[in-house]
Amino acid sequence: MDRRSLLLWLAATPAFAAADAPDAMRFPVDFGAHPAARTEWWYVTGSLQADARLWGFQITFFRSSTGIGAGAQSRFNPAQLLFAHAAVTDLEGRRLRHDQRIARAGFGIAQARADDTDVVLRDWRLARTPSPAAADRSRYAAFVASDSAGFTLDLQLDSTQPVLLQGDAGLSRKGPAAGDTSRYYSEPQLTTRGTLTLDGRATAVTGRAWLDHEWSDAFVPAGAVGWDWIGMNLDDGSALTAFRLRRADGGSVYAGGSLRRVGEAVRNFAPGEVGFTPGRVWESASSRARYPVEWTIATPAGRFTVAALLDNQELDSRGSSGAIYWEGLSDLRDESGRRVGRGYLEMTGYAAALRL
């Protein structure tokens, strides 16, 4: 089965174990993979700095249950697929570098452990160990290297806060129907250090990152073509999430998000409390998709402007997950125009309707 046929098969497969099961999240096991869920990802984004120079980075591992050959004992059974995307936003060079991979699980090539975060795709890896600083904290090691795009990321990411359970204790609603849910937690405000290598030149970097881990059978509800999402590390240590599932006409099917201030409980946002208003638009020369690269986002935590630090942060992942999407380093500004945070903006479904 070729890659295109396999992706079409995935789009047609039936739902797997429901993500709205009432079980509470349990760690460390829920740091690991959930092979009964149709789609899952571990998603790390952040900023890196060396002196005055700034970069953005993304490292994402996806796991997908195909439904092909369920129960078969053959090692060649493609029951689980792993994808990976990696990108570096070079602000000084005004360039986005990115790469992608895909493989079936097994054969020592690709794996996603079920008892803790340990996702491997050839020599790319994201793995968690307990933090040496505190029992309820995590340390992640991330490594990706791309010869074609000329970059290597070798990073250590340390959690500074407890795990943030999105939605109702980790059950995050994504649409109006009963099954429109995911299981979703975040690790914001990760202190980051390591080495960024560009075209053979290694630079020691430090920074701040955000990790999302989410799994579901129904990320995109009926009527939605994609989503707009932000994960922002605020300068005061708070963590702001906002998202909406978007119709083809630009309206919202559903919206949500959260705010957690340092030392406080999570404040979840109801759909009517979150508004996304597009501002300046950038058109991709390659896909002809038109992306709002500035947004006004209204939440119970305040009204903010999200502004991309580089317009062209579009990723063409048709060689792996099949989608073209925009994912980029952005600043968060308050109503006075003052920068109050930094993080990532993601926009999907602009080049074509998203299908997971």
Image: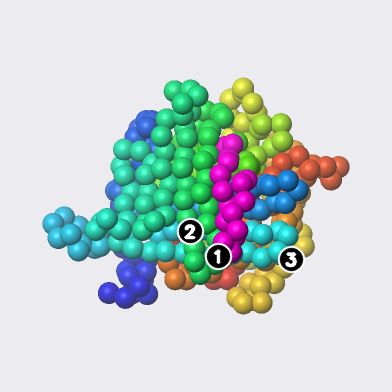
Neighbor class of circle 3 (other Cα within 10 Å; few <14, some 14-19, many 20+) is: some
Helix or strand or loop: what does disc 3 sit on? strand
Q: Residue 128: horizontal and vertical position, in percent?
A: 42, 38
Q: Looking at the image, is 79 positioned above or below residue 114? A: below
Cα distance, mark 3 to mark 2? 32 Å
Residue positioned 70% across, 51% down in the render: 54
The amino acid at mark 3 is: Val
User: Mark 1 is on which residue type?
Assistant: Gly
The residue nearer to you, when weighing 218 against 237, is 237
Mark whose residue sits in front, 1 or 3: 1
Mark 1 lies on residue: 150
Residue 194 in the magenta stretch? The answer is yes
Please report contact status of discs 1 and 2: CB closer than 8 Å, yes or no. no
The CA distance from mark 1 to mark 2 is 8 Å
For label 1, count other residues whose C-alpha is less than 10 Å away and answer few (under 14), some (14-19) or many (20+).
some
The image shows residue 43 at horizontal and vertical percentages of: 50, 49
Q: Is residue 28 above or below residue 107?
A: above
Residue wearing tag 3: 281
Could you tell whether 273 is left or right of 84 in the image? right
